[in-house]
Structures are given as structure tokens and as C-alpha cells.
Image (cartoon, rainbow, N blue to C red):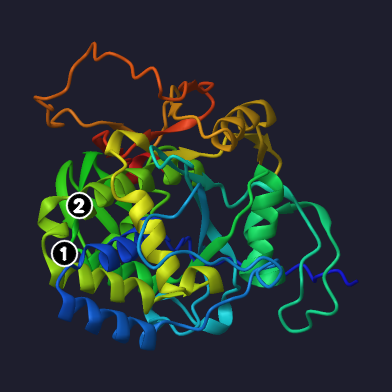
Amino acid sequence: MKTPTIARHGRLKKSNPFATIAKVLAATLAVVMVSGASVAAIAAYDLARSVKPSIALVGDDESPVSIPKIGAWEGGVNLLLVGSDSRKGQDPAFGDEDDTGDLNDVTMLLHISADHSSATVVSFPRDMFVSIPSCPDPEDPESPFDSMSYQKLNTTLMYGGLPCTVLTVSELTGLDIRFAAEVQFSGVIAMSNAVGGVPVCVGARIEDEYTGVFLDPGEHTLMGVDALQFLRTRHGVGDGSDLTRISNQQVFLSSLMRTVKSADTLSDPAKLYSLAKAALTNVVLSEQLQNIDNMVAIAMALKDIPLDQINFVQYPTGGAEGGVVPNVEAADALMAALISDQPIQLAGETGGSIPDPNAPVDPNATVDAPADPAAPTTAVLPSDVKGQSAGQYTCSDGRTLDDQ
């Protein structure tokens, strides 16, 4: 086997393509929810023609999946979504494609419980040092790369493509990941345009000269390049670290999920079709996920999960020279809950967001609702596990140039 070459990068623009998990969710929901026969038929044909080539993951050939054309996916689902920083094929405004690498600056795992009562999206810090298993060389599958004991997670896409990132996260979490997708800048822009913009709350002014984001406190409906730049900003939120950028991204994710699941979106076949095509034409999918039947089944497993049972979580870490390392105790608690399909309760403050003081009050909410004796026990996670649910309204905790 051979050892991959470590890429030496010069100083690049402070940027991070945001691969929201909701891209895949919206695409699959769209296929399910478009009810008109003629629209559905046209959409299925057009989407099948327009999707990008798929990527085979390790183990795909050994364990093919066959599911019904109608019905929810049986059992749990693990789906990895990766955001690449490559500028190849992107607008020149984001930089010269020859001056950038191909790093997975965003790595997110969607886990749907086997009973389809809850879903968790785990964001993995790009600068987290992990063990990388032996990965196949995309250009020479018969000569795999050597494993490595201590490398940053965001190098896995460069080493062995999407399959290598999947193998690494699977080894790290103990979860079997059957589906994966990769997206670049254009996918973020297309999806935010298709949904008609995402309303985000800014709690304190955001100022970031690197991404050109300058937003006053209040609500802003972001789409296109504005949405992308908001999701790339690091210097303008929290303490300026990648960790607080993750929590800022979760502000957007939660709002996007509420938007996608709202009546205004789900009752509009044209908008749903736009969402599906925007995702499928801008995202590279693994072979199992590119199968339309599989996408529909996953969507049906997701569509009835309440917002307060869809959690966005940051993988817990501790400090290390040049990056971060897994907080093993807290991470084990999180993964144990996901592996056993327990719903989770988060206690940690995120650091890059604050509660929305103008959050709507649900008049149907009950404080002392009786517990369902058949429901699985909720796992109360350590305070080091940070995040929020899609049902929580939060605001970005911005910072100005004076604090940078």
C-alpha cells in the first residue's frame, strides 16, 4: 500500500462551503410530496437525466439494497453529507480553481432512528485530528492508501474521495454509513434560491471582511450568494473559530428545516420540484443514494418527524495544538444514544448563537404532557455536547471588526 502525500497549502481565503443536510432532505421530500401524477412523472424523468455521476462507496457491491418503490425506509438511516472547498467548476469569484485543494471543510452525518421518531445531524469540526483507515485510491483502486493515525478530518476527501471520508467517519462513530453526498458552492446557492430564501435571525451585528458579510441585528431573508457567504463566515460570529461557525450554521439549518417543512413549501409542487432539481443537479451522490426509490423511502422516513425531535449537534472536542481532538467521553455518550436509537436531550450552550427573544410561542404546547410509556428513554447528554433542535428559534451571535 502507499501513503498519500500531505498537501502543503499556502494562505487561502478564509472560506468554507456549507453543505447543509437539508439539501438532501429537501430533495427527497420533494420527490415524495409532489402529488400530481403528471408533475411527478416529468420530475422523475428529468431528475433521472440531470443527476451527476454517482460514487461507489466501499461495500456497495457486496451488500446491495433493494427496497419497495412505495413506503418508508425500513429501519434506521445513516447518511453523510460533505462540503468540498474545491473551486473546480465554480464561479471565479470564489478563487482560482488551481489555487485550492479538495478538502471536506464541512462533514455532517444524518442519523434517522429505526422507528422514525427522531433524527440527529452531527457536524464534525474540519480541524479535528482523527485516525484515517486504509482508503482506496480513486485512480488506482487495487493499490489503497496506508492508514494514518493522526490527521485532520478535512484531508480525507483529498486522500481518497468521498468513500474515504465515509470510512473515516464510520470508524470514528461506530455507525454503518450506507449513503453519502458531496456538494460545492454552487449547490448551496441553488438550494437557497429554490426554497425562496431562508429567514435568519442576527442577535448581534456581524462584520466579516473575508466573506463580505455585514448584517445588522434583526431578521434577514438570505438566498443565493448572500446565504452562502453567511454560512462561510467565521470571523464575524462567536469567537471567530470554526466551532462557533458550526453553531452559526445550525441557526441557518434549523430555519431552513422549518421552511422546508412549512405548509407554504410542501403545498407548492413547483417549489418542491425546484428544490429537488436544485439538489440533484448540484450534488454528487453515492450509488445507493442516487437511486430514486431509496431517496423516496428515506424522505418518507423523515417527513413526519416533529421539529423538536430533529437535532443539530456539534461533535464534542477538546483543544490540541493546531486543531482539536475528540472528547472521547462526551462523544461516546452521543454515539451510544444514536446507536441505540434513543432520542437525545441537549444541555450544552453552542457558543455561536443565542436564543431568539422573539421566538413564537406554540399555543398547543403543554408543559406537563404525560410521557408515552412505549417511547424509548431520552438520553440526557453531557454539557460538552452542544447544539439545538430544529424547533428552537435562535439568533447568530455576531461580532464586529473591533473585536477581531
Look at the numbered disc 1 and give the secondary structure of its residue.
Answer: loop
Q: Mark 1 or 2 closer to N-term? A: 1
Please indicate whether residue 308 sits to the left or right of residue 293 in the image.
Answer: left
Tell me the kind of residue under disc 1.
Gly
Task: Kindly identify which residue carries mark 2.
Answer: 259
Pick the residue in front: 229 or 387.
387
From this viewpoint, which residue is outermost toward the bottom?
Answer: 49
**Residue drawn 40% across the image and 73% down it:** 292
**Residue drawn 61% across the image and 31% down it:** 336
Callout 2: few (<14), some (14-19), or many (20+) C-alpha neighbours within 10 Å? some
Q: Is residue 381 above or below residue 237?
A: above
| Quarter-of-image position of residue 50 | bottom left
From this viewpoint, which residue is outermost toward the right?
Answer: 1
Q: Is residue 81 above or below residue 284?
A: above
Pick the residue in front: 248 or 198.
198
Quarter of the rendering occupied by the C terminus: top left
Quarter of the rendering occupied by the N terminus: bottom right
Q: Position of residue 226 (x, y in %)?
A: 25, 63
Q: Is residue 34 above or below residue 174?
A: below
Tell me the kind of residue under disc 2.
Thr
Task: Kindly identify which residue carries mark 1.
Answer: 196
Please indicate whether residue 353 sits to the left or right of residue 40 in the image.
Answer: right
Pick the residue in front: 84 or 68.
68
